[in-house]
Amino acid sequence: MKKIAVVIALLLFATLSFAQKIQEKDVPNAVKLAFQKQFPTAQKVKWEKESGNFEAEFEMDKTETSVLLDLQGNILETETEIAVNQLPKAILDYVATKHKGQKIKEAAKITDAKGVLTYEAEIKGKDLIFDEKGNFLKEVKK
C-alpha cells in the first residue's frame, strides 16, 4: 500500500513539474500586456504555465513561434520555427554523422533575454541544441 502511495505522489509531482495548459483568463495582466505589446499580430495563441513562468505558443506571419515570459512580463526566450535547410551546415553535418539515418523533424532558432542565439533540431524523441555557429551543446529528451 505504501508503494502505491509513493508511486501516486511521484506521478503527481511529475505532472505538476511539466508545462500545464492554462486559459488566457488565468494569465496575469502584466504578462498578457507585455505579450500583446511585443506581438500585436499574434494569432491562435495558446498559453502554458512552465516552472512559474508563462509560455505563449502562437502563429505570426504563418510561422509557429513561442515566447517565455516571467511574472512581470519580461521576455526570457523566444523560439521561432525555421525550415530544416535554414540550419547552419555544421548542424546538418553533425546530425548526419552522429545520428545516421535519422531525419530532422523540426528546427527552430531560440533567442534568450540577452540576445544569445541557439538552434534546436528535433529528431526521434529528442531535441539537439546547438550554439549560433552550429556547435553541439546538449541533448534534451522529450
Image: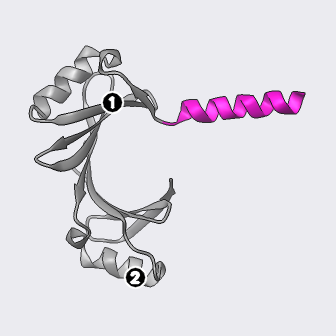
Q: Position of residue 16 (x, y in %)?
A: 56, 29
Image point (19%, 29%), residue name: 35
Asked if 73 appears above or below 123 in the picture, the reply is above
| Mark-to-mark CA distance, 1 and 2 | 35 Å
Using residue 17 as the reference point, say whether residue 3 is left or right of it: right
Using residue 33 as the reference point, say whether residue 46 is left or right of it: right
Residue in front for this viewpoint, 67 or 112 = 67
Q: Could you tell me if residue 114 is visible in this image? A: no
Magenta segment's dominant SS is helix
Write down the region rendered in magenta.
Answer: 1-18
Q: Could you tell me if residue 124 is visible in this image? A: yes
Q: Splitting the image into 4 quarters, where does residue 70 fall? A: top left
Q: Nearer the viewer, mark 1 or mark 2?
A: 1
Image mark for residue 96: 2
Asked if 75 appears above or below 137 in the picture, the reply is above
Image mark for residue 84: none
Image point (18%, 50%), residue name: 63
Q: Position of residue 126 (x, y in %)?
A: 48, 60
Image point (46%, 35%), residue name: 19
Which residue is labeled 1 in the image?
Answer: 47
Mark 1 is on which residue type?
Trp
Q: Secondary structure at mark 1?
A: strand
Image point (23%, 46%), residue name: 65
The stretch drawn in magenta includes residue 64:
no
Q: Residues within 10 Å of mark 1 (few under 14, many from 20)?
A: many
